[in-house]
Each structure stands twice: as C-alpha cells, then as structure tokens.
Image (spheres, rainbow, N blue to C red):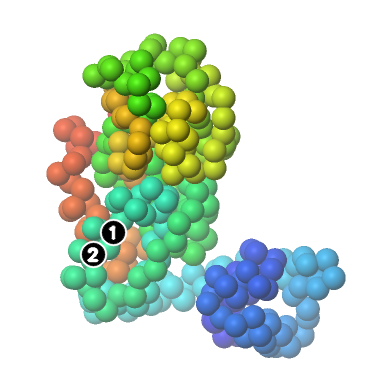
Amino acid sequence: MELRHLRTFRVVARTLNFTRAAAELHYAQSSVTEQIQALEAELGSPLFDRATRKLTAAGERLVGYADRMLSLAEEAKAAVDAERGEPDGELTIGALETLCTHWVPPILGAYRTRWPRVRMSVKEGGRGELYKGVRESEMDVCFTFGTPPDDPALASRALKAEPLVVIVPPGHPLAEKEEIRPGDLRGVGFLATPKGCGFREMLDRIDGPVVGTEVGSLAALGRCVAAGMGCGIVPAMVDHPGAVAVPLAGRTTEVTMTWRRRDEHKPSVAALLATAYALSSKDMCSSGSSKVNAGAIDA
C-alpha cells in the first residue's frame, strides 16, 4: 500500500466528503477518487458506502491501521532527520485566528530565515479543532490560548501571559476607568462569541456580565462594541478599532504551544519549539512557570 493513498484515505475517512478532502489535500477530486479506488482494488473490498457516505466495516477497520502505518513512517523519517540534524521536509502549524494575525508571523519569519529548507503551512481553527489536528498528525504544532488538554500523547508549554481587556463603546461609563475589576461588570450588557468558544469561557467565568448578543468572531465583536451594542472581553493583542480598551485587573490568559511528544526530537519540530520559546521568553511571566497562573482564564 502506498503511503500517499493511506494519507488520502485518512482525510476522506475523517471528512466523509471527497470534495472537502480534495480541497484539504490540494488535489483534484478525480485524483482523490482514483487513489481511493486503487486502495480498494488492492484490498479487494470497498472502503466507503457511496450511497450513505459512510465508511464500510472494512473502511472502519483500516482507519486504525492507516494511522499506525503513517505514524511509523513519520517516526522513520524523524529518525533519519535526527541523524542528519538538518531540518527539512514539511511542517504544519495550527493557530487560533487571533494568534495567526498577531503571534505566529514573527515566529515563522525567524524560523524561515534560519531553516529555509522546511516547507511550512499554517491552518486556522478553533481550539478543539487544533488539538485534534495535532493529536491526529494533521498538524505538527499548534498555538492556542489557555490550558491545553490533559493528554499523555501531547506536550505543551506556556509562552506568554496575555492580559485581558474590556472593550467598551466610546463614552461608556467604564471607559473612564484606569482598570476594571470583575465586580464593576455586574449587570453590564456584553457581547460574546457562541457557547463552546474559548473566548466565551473568558466571559462566563466572571460573575455579573449579562450577555445580550452573540457574534461569530472577535472581529465582529469588536465592530459591534464600537457601534455601541455592548461591551466585550478580549486578549489585549486583539484589534478593536473604534472601541476603548480598559485593562481587566488581575486577569490573563496564556499563549500556549502544543505538540506530539513523540515528535519533539524531530529536527523541524524541535527547531520550531526552540524558535517560539526564544522569541517569547522575554515576555514570559516573572516566575518562568509554564503553568497557567492563579488569575488566568482559559480561552
């Protein structure tokens, strides 16, 4: 079995959609179909039920084997790379939208300057999606806010304690404060991202704010605040043109990077971890701890 066929199969098995799989893999849809058909012919069994768009019993069984075979292939390549010691190959980085805009570019710029042979790609996603991508080897490293998952297959390190701010419309009573304490927010109307979003957790962990409107992104939240629809809580690095930002006393969230433990000695991954830590070390909490501090809020 060809590894590229197994990689394609794994993406199709996850998406259960040939069109989406082709877009994710940057293949023509006909190429995805041909690879799956070749794999089915080799195994002598259909892997997908085209009528129900679900995996067959044979397909369900192959998923685990495909994961193990691809993982072993990655380990073999990592062993050879480690012997040579020169990072190359491909590296996929995942990050929240905010971090893709404000945090990741300087890291990737420094990395590219030092290791130009590595081909990098960046994917945006929600926190759960990013952790899943790293866990399932679709991404090598991801950057998120807050406490990482308790997963023995993953390793994480906090890079920076990011202050939280309350953004308010111009002229709002809170705009006159030098800093805001959680008690100041009791009964205040807020905008928030939907339930399940990490940024919503920032707000839900504070007793008092009243959520009147849900918006789909931090960019939309900032524009709605500027338009006078309510207040919001965001990391200080988030852009909020037209709104006034006031520090939220004693509250931070952590910028965290997460990777697979088994890959941490892979040259391309190890070099990225070292680059990210070196660039962020000057902004680390004075304690130097990689654990979220007592006043932190997960995102």
Q: Amino acid at mark 1?
A: Pro
Secondary structure beneath label 2: helix
Q: Residues within 10 Å of mark 2 (few under 14, many from 20)?
A: few
Q: How many marks are shown on the rendered structure? A: 2
Q: Is residue 180 visible?
A: yes
Q: For the residues marked 2 and 1, what is the alpha-carbon distance in whole angstroms?
A: 6 Å
Q: Which residue is mark 1?
A: 105
Q: Is residue 202 visible?
A: no
Residue 69 lies, in percent from the top left, at 54, 74
Q: Which residue is mark 2?
A: 109
Determine the residue positioned at 35% across, 18% down. 174
Residue 47 lies, in percent from the top left, at 74, 75
Q: Residues within 10 Å of mark 1 (few under 14, many from 20)?
A: few
Say left or right for 177 vs 74: left
Mark 2 and mark 1 in contact? Answer it, CB < 8 Å: yes
Secondary structure beneath label 1: helix
Q: Picture quarter containing residue 146?
A: top left
Identify the mark at residue 72; answer none if there is no mark.
Answer: none
* Quarter the C terminus occupies: top left
Say left or right for 204 vs 13: left
Residue 261 lies, in percent from the top left, at 38, 56
Determine the residue positioned at 24% across, 70% down. 112
Question: Which of these two is toward me, 256 or 155?
Answer: 256
Say left or right for 126 vs 146: right
Determine the residue positioned at 38% across, 41% down. 145
User: From what the image shows, is residue 118 above or below residue 127?
Assistant: below
